[in-house]
Amino acid sequence: MAPVDQRPQIIAVDAAGQAELAGERPGPPALDATVSPMADLHLSQDTDADRLISRDPLALLIGMVLDQQIPLERAFSAPRDLEERLGGDIDVLRIAGMDPDELVAIFSQRPALHRFPTANAKRIQQLCQLVVDEYGGQAANIWMMAETGADLLARIRALPGFGEQKARIFVGLLGKQLGVQPPGWDGAADPFGQEGTFMSVADIVDPESLGKVRAYKQQLKAAARAGTDQPTP
């Protein structure tokens, strides 16, 4: 018997009206990811911030982009602060169309949303513009539209702020915690799709696992300094 495709079904809708109201040129039809599988994430270790990234795919993407050169808890709590500074809503069309200097000012308010607010405000605006232009304004369509793990990795790797390793980590997070598992997803995430490891945000589900991931990263740095073999995750 042929295997059953258990991936969530997606419903095609037209985003032209939404884009037109926002003063933007209508983009491609959107695939409304209203049934996108979202998990109970615990990346920021803050209840409200984790609730936001669990229900809002764009907030999760923003947190992932910001997760560099600052503590990961701060990176994934920053979308909550951004939401508050924007008046209670992270709107992809609004961010994409904002005056860049205004967005930089929002990122720079104390406490700053990142160690490098100017560069990351620009990166987040570019991300939002891409979501509007290529995914109908629905961030979850990035993974809902992927047919294979390789396709998913390529889509994520093409996003502003995502290098090769970060893209693989995010594929691992999607597969392990959000149930986004197109054929070959674990290979595309390799080595971050492996079960029973504590290597990245893909493996953080509580304070204990956060501590294990942090310890592994410290061991990696120590091994790199000493020129020894990498530790077992």
Image (cartoon, rainbow, N blue to C red):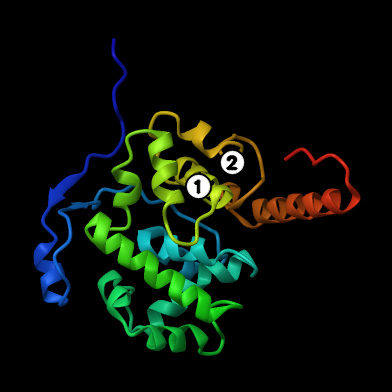
- Judge by depth and name the residue closer to the eye, 8 or 47: 8
**Foreground residue among 226 and 58:** 226
Rendered residue at 42%/43% (across/down): 154
Q: Residue at x 33, y 80 (%)?
A: 88
Quickly name the residue at label 2: 192
- In the rendered image, the quadrant that contains the N terminus is top left
Residue 120 can be seen, yes or no: yes
Secondary element under disc 2, as helix, strand or loop, is loop
| Cβ–Cβ under 8 Å for marks 2 and 1 | yes
Residue 140, image x, y percentages: 32, 53
Q: Residue at x 42, y 70 (%)?
A: 124
Residue 218 vs 8, above or below: the answer is below
127 in relation to 157, above or below: below
How many numbered marks, from 0 up? 2
| Residue 205 visible here | no
Circle 2 Cα neighbour tier, 10 Å, few/some/many (<14 / 14–19 / ≥20): many
Q: Residue 185's quadrant in the figure?
A: top left
Snapshot quadrant of residue 195:
top right
Relative side of 5 to 72, left or right? left
Which of 161 and 15 lies nearest the eye of the viewer?
Answer: 161
Q: Which residue is mark 1?
A: 173
Indicate the position of residue 41 as horizontal and vertical percent values. 48, 56
Quarter holding the C terminus is top right
Q: How far separated are the C-alphas under marks 2 and 1? A: 8 Å
**Counting other residues with Cα less than 10 Å from the Cα at mark 1, is it few (<14), some (14-19), or many (20 or more)?**
many
Which is more N-terminal, label 1 or label 2?
A: 1
110 relative to 115, above or below: below
Name the secondary structure under disc 1. Answer: helix
Tag 2: amino acid: Phe
